[in-house]
Image (cartoon, rainbow, N blue to C red):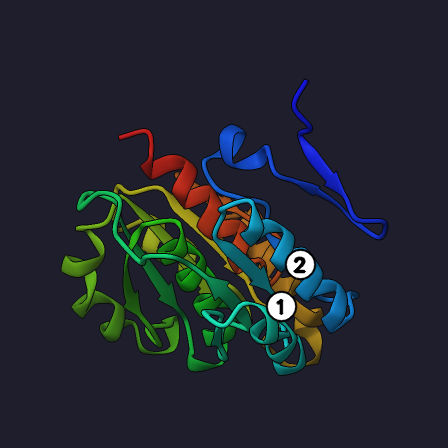
Amino acid sequence: MKKLYEDIGFAKIDHHRQIRKGFPEVIYCEGKTPEQIAHIAYSISRKGHDVLATRADRKAYLAVKKILNKAKYHETARIITVKKKWTVVSGEWLVSIVTAGTADLPVAEEAAVTAEFLGIKVERIYDVGVAGIHRLIKNLPKINKSRVVIVVAGMEGALPSVLGGLIDKPIIAVPTSVGYGSSFKGLAALLTMMNSCAPGVAVVNIDNGFGAAVMAYSIVRLF
C-alpha cells in the first residue's frame, strides 16, 4: 500500500489530503520554528503540491525562501504561498469578503489569500460596518453577485446579522479579536454572531479567516 503520509520525526505530513479534500495539507506556523516550517514546506512541494502556510512571520518566510525560491509572503495575511500558477478554477466561484473595519484586515486577508490559493475569485469590500450603514448599502449590488459571503467583524460583531437580513447568499461570519476590553478578545463578537436572528449565517472561530475560506471553497465547488 502506498504511504499516505511522510514521517519526518517532528511531523507526519499528510500527502493524501490533496486527493481527499482537493487541496494539500496546510502549515499552521505558530508554535513551529522557521526550520521546521521550511522542512515541512519542502516536503509538501517535493511531492508536487502547492504550499500554503498560515500565521507565518517574516523569519519563517525567509527560511522557506531559502529552499523554495518561488515562495511569496503576503504580509497583511501573514501567509506564505508557493504556487505554480494562480488561476481561478471557475468564473462562477466568486466570494465576497466584507469587513466591518480596517482593523479587521489581517483576518480578512487571511481569508482572501487562502480563497485565491484555492482558485476562488475574491471581491474585497472593506470598512463597511454598522457605524456607517450607508457604506454597506452602497455595496450591496457587488455583494449580491457572490456565491458565498465571508463577513469579518470585531467589536460587537453586528455586521453579519445586518447583511443576513438583506441578501439571500450563505454568510460565513468571522469574529475578530478587535475591540475594547469588554469585547473579551472577540468573544463578544462570537456570541453575537452565534445568536444572530438572521437566517443563513454560520460562524467560525475567532480570527479564523483560513477556516472561513475553506468553508466557502467547500460550498462553491458544489455548483
Q: Is residue 142 left or right of residue 220?
A: left
Q: Cα distance, mark 2 to mark 1?
A: 6 Å
| Front-most of residues 197 and 141 | 141
Q: Where is residue 107 in the image (x, y as percent from the top left)?
A: 51, 68
| Front-most of residues 110 and 41 | 41
Please report contact status of discs 2 and 1: CB closer than 8 Å, yes or no: yes
Residue 153, can we see it?
Answer: no
The correct choice, above or below, for 78 with respect to 175 in the image is below
Q: Is residue 71 left or right of residue 148?
A: right
Question: For the residue carrying disc 2, how many other residues have a C-alpha within 10 Å: few (<14), some (14-19), or many (20+)?
Answer: some
Question: For the residue carrying disc 1, how many other residues have a C-alpha within 10 Å: few (<14), some (14-19), or many (20+)?
Answer: some
Residue in view at x 41 percent, y 71 percent = 100
Q: In which quarter of the image is the C terminus?
A: top left
| Front-most of residues 62 and 67 | 67
Q: Which residue lies furthest to the right in this view?
A: 9
SS at circle 2: strand
Q: Name the residue under label 1.
A: 55
Q: Quadrant of the rendered structure where residue 181 is?
A: bottom right
The correct choice, above or below, for 100 with respect to 51 in the image is below
Q: Is residue 190 left or right of residue 5?
A: left
Q: Mark 2 points at which residue?
A: 28
Q: Where is residue 128 in the image (x, y as percent from the top left)?
A: 32, 73
